[in-house]
Image (cartoon, rainbow, N blue to C red):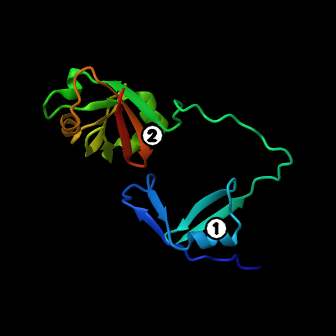
Amino acid sequence: MSRQPEWHIMFRTHGVTDPRVSAFSIGDGFPKFMEENNVDLGTLLVIERVDVESLHVTIYRRPDETTPVLTPPPSPQTDLRPHFRKTLRATNVRVSKSTRLDIPTAFWRSLGEERFNGAWYTLEGPLHTVLVKSGTYSSAKQTFCFLTKGWIDFVAMNRLNLGDTVVFTLVGVAEFEVTMV
């Protein structure tokens, strides 16, 4: 049985407390891997974590094309990143320990409730960036996911007001870009 070739690549896991949610960085050594495996635009890499020190990479190459396929560029208004829109109500902007922002059910269900059960998120606002804590509450009939600790600071630092409409776009594992509409 022949041994698979190996490349030594810097691989780091960031801030993982829940094994179901994690962020990874791949660094030094990766350009050499790309070059030696002729990885170019259109090549798909499936990277599987084998253990804390090893990754397994399967390379899928684009089939040879005799005629180019022309696809129209995506509309500049189409954002395929996960996002949701909220119009701020009194319960979202009043200065109180109970101030929170409810996350729409369809949004948190698409990502999984566990992503919002006590996780911290960076909210990058129009003026300032703030770290906020998420939470969940479940009753017999319903579950809610929301942003709590730090949310009122985000509201104040970014001068958000009752009636403002904001869009939360997930731009990282634990980071939202928040823009006013």
Residue at 68% from the left image edge and 34% from the top image edge: 72
Residue 104 is marked as none
Q: Which residue is mark 2?
A: 112
Which residue ends up furthest to the right in the rendered image?
Answer: 66
Q: Give the secondary structure at mark 2.
A: loop
Category of crowding for the residue at label 1, using alpha-carbon neighbours closer than 10 angstroms: few (below 14), some (14–19), many (at least 20): few
Which one is in front, 15 or 25?
25
Which image quarter holds the C terminus? top left
Q: Secondary structure at mark 1?
A: helix
For the point 66% across and 70% down, which residue is it? 35
Q: Position of residue 29 (x, y in %)?
A: 55, 74
Q: Is residue 7 left or right of residue 79?
A: right
N-term mark: 1 or 2: 1
Quadrant of the image occupied by residue 95: top left
Residue type at numbered disc 2: Gly
Question: Residue pushed farthest left?
Answer: 96
* Towards the viewer: 9 or 104: 9
Q: Identify the residue at horizontal 30%, vertical 45% (top origin).
A: 118
The quadrant of the rendering that contains the N terminus is bottom right
The image position of residue 99, as x and y in percent, is: 19, 31
Location of residue 101 in the rendering, given as x and y in whole percent from the top left corner:
28, 31
- Does 27 appear above or below 144? below
- Mark linked to residue 34: 1
State the image quarter where residue 134 is shown: top left
Q: CA distance from mark 1 to mark 2?
A: 33 Å
Q: Amino acid at mark 1?
A: Met
Q: Residues within 10 Å of mark 2 (few under 14, many from 20)?
A: few
Which quarter of the picture shows residue 14?
A: bottom left
